[in-house]
């Protein structure tokens, strides 16, 4: 069966959508990505859609689903390279892709992913530090 | 309104949606539509074709090049013999969906096109046509 390849690069997974996706292929990508996040423990997903000439509500929903599932699996998602005509159409269609981070190109997307991860790790660190402080406080 | 070109295509499988999209893209380019307009029409075709497949159980797409008042346009008509729509007004509302989708298919598509017409009778099927003028 036809599949969209998922590349692993360090703690990130990279996907480039370069074909006019039919619905089953989009669903397959959603399943494959969640499997791979869980199997590899990836912390970030970058989906490049610069070759995509159209995003309809179905593909839009798939992208939003991937981002939501990834978040639950402790991974951040960034969508990169959306063509201006696609962006204009999406907004007019009424699709706002709430909760999906975007970047203009892959390079900026990678930078954004890294900073999102640092932020997430920083917050986790602070939380642990806070708890330790609290524990110390309780003992006193 | 005169019809310059008329193609009837099946909408029976998920792959047919892709074929309809590509045909609309090719005609839109031929008619000289801008990239944004092409994208809007292709997206509209995709939404309507999916409705025909998902809600109507499959049907046909008629893609026409039309002309009126010295303007040319692209008209797409999707027809099925499915269960039909009971409340047309409700079906046109943003966010209303019976298929577990986002409910943007019909209302969103209307915004992407210049003309939009929805006809449906419960138990008899649905016919949607949408036109964009150059």
Image: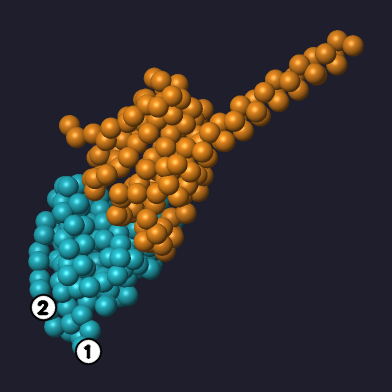
Chain colours: A orange, B cyan
User: Which residue is farthest front?
Assistant: A107
Q: Counting other residues with Cα less than 10 Å from the Cα at mark 2, is it few (<14), some (14-19), or many (20 or more)? A: few
In the rendered view, does B80 fall on the left or right side of B97? left
Residue at figure coordinates x 30%, y 49% from the top left: A51
Whether residue B47 is visible to the viewer of this picture, yes or no, is: no
Q: Return the residue nearer the eye: A120 or B110.
A: A120
Residue at figure coordinates x 34%, y 49% from the top left: A50
N-terminal of the pair, mark 1 or mark 2, is 2
In the rendered view, does A140 fall on the left or right side of B72? right
B68 vs A76: above or below: below
For the N terminus of chain B, the image quarter is: bottom left
A36 vs B51: above or below: above
Whether residue B16 is visible to the viewer of this picture, yes or no, is: yes
The CA distance from mark 1 to mark 2 is 14 Å
Q: Is disc 2 on the same chain as disc 1?
A: yes
Measured as percent of width and height from the top left, residue B21 is found at 21, 57
The image quarter in which residue B88 lies: bottom left
- In which chain is the residue bearing label 1? B
Q: Which mark is residue B4?
A: 2
Residue at figure coordinates x 34%, y 36% from the top left: A15
In the rendered view, does B123 fall on the left or right side of A58? left
Measured as percent of width and height from the top left, residue A11 is found at 46, 25
């Amino acid at each position: 069966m036809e599949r969209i390849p998922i590349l692993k690069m360090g703690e990130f997974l990279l996907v480039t959508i370069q074909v006019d996706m039919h619905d089953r292929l989009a669903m397959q990508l959603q399943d494959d990505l969640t499997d791979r996040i869980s199997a590899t423990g990836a912390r970030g997903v970058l989906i490049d859609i610069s070759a995509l000439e159209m995003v309809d509500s179905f593909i839009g929903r798939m992208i939003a689903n991937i981002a939501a599932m990834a978040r639950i699996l402790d991974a951040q998602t960034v969508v990169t390279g959306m063509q201006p005509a696609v962006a204009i159409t999406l907004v007019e269609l009424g699709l706002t892709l709430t909760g999906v981070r975007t970047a203009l190109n892959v390079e900026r997307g990678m930078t954004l992913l890294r900073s999102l991860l640092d932020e997430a790790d920083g917050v986790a660190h602070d939380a642990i530090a806070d708890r330790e402080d609290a524990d110390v406080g309780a003992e006193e | 309104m005169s019809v310059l070109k008329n193609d009837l295509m099946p909408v029976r499988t998920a792959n047919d949606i892709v074929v309809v999209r590509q045909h609309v893209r090719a005609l839109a380019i031929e008619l000289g539509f801008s990239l944004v307009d092409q994208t809007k029409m292709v997206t509209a075709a995709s939404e309507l074709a999916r409705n025909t497949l998902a809600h109507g159980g499959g049907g046909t797409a008629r893609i026409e090049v039309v002309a009126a008042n010295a303007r040319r346009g692209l008209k797409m008509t999707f027809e099925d013999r499915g269960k039909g729509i009971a409340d047309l007004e409700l079906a046109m509302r943003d966010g209303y969906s019976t298929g577990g989708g986002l409910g943007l298919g019909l209302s969103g598509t209307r915004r992407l096109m210049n003309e939009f017409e929805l006809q449906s009778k419960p138990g008899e099927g649905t016919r949607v046509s949408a036109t964009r003028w150059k």
